[in-house]
Image (cartoon, rainbow, N blue to C red):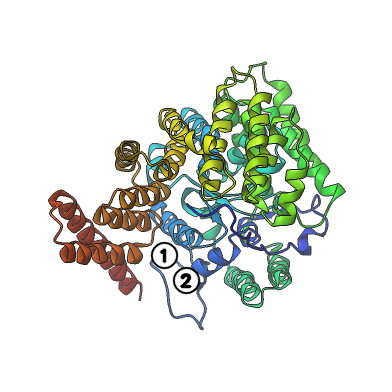
Amino acid sequence: MRPLTGTPQASPTPTHGCALRPWACTRRHWLTQALRSAFAVPVAAALWPWLPTAAHAQTAPLPALGDGGDMTLAEERELGDQIARAIYRDPAYLDDPALAELLQALWQPLLAGARQRGELSDELAQRYAWRLLLGRDPTVNAFALPGGYLGIHLGLIGVTQRADELASVLAHEMSHVTQRHIARLLTRQSQQAPLVLAAMILGALAASAAKNADIAGAAVAGGQALAVQGQLNFSRDMEREADRIGLAVLQAAGFDGQGFIGMFERLQQSARLNDDGSFPYLRSHPLTTERIADMRARLQLQPPSPPTAGVSPRWHATMAARARVLADPAPDRLRTHARALRPDDPANAYAAALAHGLLREPAAALAAQAALQRSLPADDAAAQRAARWLRLELLTLLYPEATLGAAERASLPALVRAALDDGTRAGLLLAAQAAPRSGDGELLRTCAQRLQAWCVQHTHDAQAWEVLAGVQRALGYPVRAGRAEGEARLALLDETGALDRFRATQRLAAQQRSDDWQELAVLDARVRHVEAVLREREAALRRQR
């Protein structure tokens, strides 16, 4: 798990180009949105090798941008994997168990609603990744990527006041993917498209090298100016289609359709009051009066249907507060959150407790967490669970601090057991991260067993594999830990890194004369599997040449 105190990465500051008048823009550029995100550099780096330019003979096993023909599901997924592979290596990428739990509580009903309505076919559901990539960035941004990946900035989560508002953004972006808008745009013949993409991608890479976001902004604006009438922009019809289908999916999932209106109005009002580049989502999702009016009309024509999705408002509020704190964990910002404690406000108390924890202030952090717990109704199970997770996280983080009291240290095993038994991914991961500090060997072995079972069922959960590696190492099983580390690299689409780790673990096992024959057999099978994957990729590259 990445440390909570990581430095947020600067994302390119949006410049104006077509976006000088955000409500007047008639088109949306999905790649502009991605290149203005926290993941601008990895997206650019992933796309650059297969731009069809004379200067670049190197190509990936995908059709070049601007080529004719239809992009297949497999090709779009491969492109999405290339971008995700780069994003996973970016410091801005964050897998936060507590926030992921909330996002999945919204995302899974949306996927089910899309399937129920026939928007998500069985083939699309199986071929695409359908993964949410969280970015540590305070700007308000979300964007769809090829192959079923969606990027979400912490800043977007932080500005939402209701779970329905956050779900509406996910539903809209999901609809761009289910309707294959990106694939349709990428495969349109356009001589201009490679030049536009090259300008934008070079801008993002140049900004990284020069550590100057204005360079990327200027290049993106220049690329937009060339493509105002080009082929790579989502058209008005595509935006309307994503609105219409997104609303239907949102309601089929049991959420309140007013979430769309609330989110639109909040973003529009905020951008009008503070147009400083903090709302890049609006640069590529212009909220015209027509779009808002159309959404209102659709809702008025529908018979009343009370929402059925049960996401606790207080749980959402505390997670929005968490997103605001983690989006910008600079010491001065943390102190602002810490000083703003209001014990009767759960979201405020949560932010203060987390901020004090990141500032390594045990007494103040635990006092604010206790205030949070007191402010929550006993029957709000989700919010109470989030408060317990926070206390467990704080004790794990602050355990090395000399000022942490003996009573607080003694309470750790009970909190670990409670988190293990709550049946959630977040509880499992937080418990397993805390267990080595508990000094309870039996509890540590229980965590290892639970994590192993989880990883068998969720092989693409990289963080779970990483946490399992730490638990196995704490138990004195270095070979099992090494294999888990290799599985984590594989889940992050880093096949070369996975193979290196698997082979290093084989050498370690030989040196230690390990007799864990079952683990060694699995390790040998994983080496052969990854070697086959890399051979197939190399063969595909040769065929493209």
Placement of 367 over or under 403, stated as above or below: above
Q: Residue at x 58, y 67 (%)?
A: 41
Q: Secondary structure at mark 1?
A: loop
N-terminal of the pair, mark 2 or mark 1, is 2
Estimate the x, y position of residue 433 in percent, counting from the top left: 44, 45
Estimate the x, y position of residue 417 in percent, counting from the top left: 41, 31
Q: Give the quadrant of residue 323.
A: top right
Q: Return the mark for residue 439.
A: none
Q: Residue at x 73, y 44 (%)?
A: 338
Near mark 1 (Cα within 10 A), the count class, few <14, some 14-19 or many ≥20, is: some
Q: Which is more toward the observer, 2 or 531?
A: 2
Q: Which is more toward the observer, 314 or 53?
A: 314
Spatial distance from mark 2 to mark 1, Cα to Cα?
A: 8 Å
Q: Looking at this rendering, what residue extends furthest in the right direction?
A: 273
Query: Pointers 2 and 1 in contact (CB under 8 A)?
Result: yes
Q: Residue at x 41, y 58 (%)?
A: 78
250 vs 541, left or right, is: right
Q: Return the mark for residue 62.
A: 1
The answer to whether one can see residue 245 in this image is yes
Identify which amino acid the numbered label 1 is placed on.
Leu
Placement of 49 over or under 112, stated as above or below: below
Near mark 2 (Cα within 10 A), the count class, few <14, some 14-19 or many ≥20, is: many
Q: Return the mark for residue 50.
A: 2
Q: Secondary structure at mark 2?
A: helix
Estimate the x, y position of residue 191 in percent, counting from the top left: 58, 71
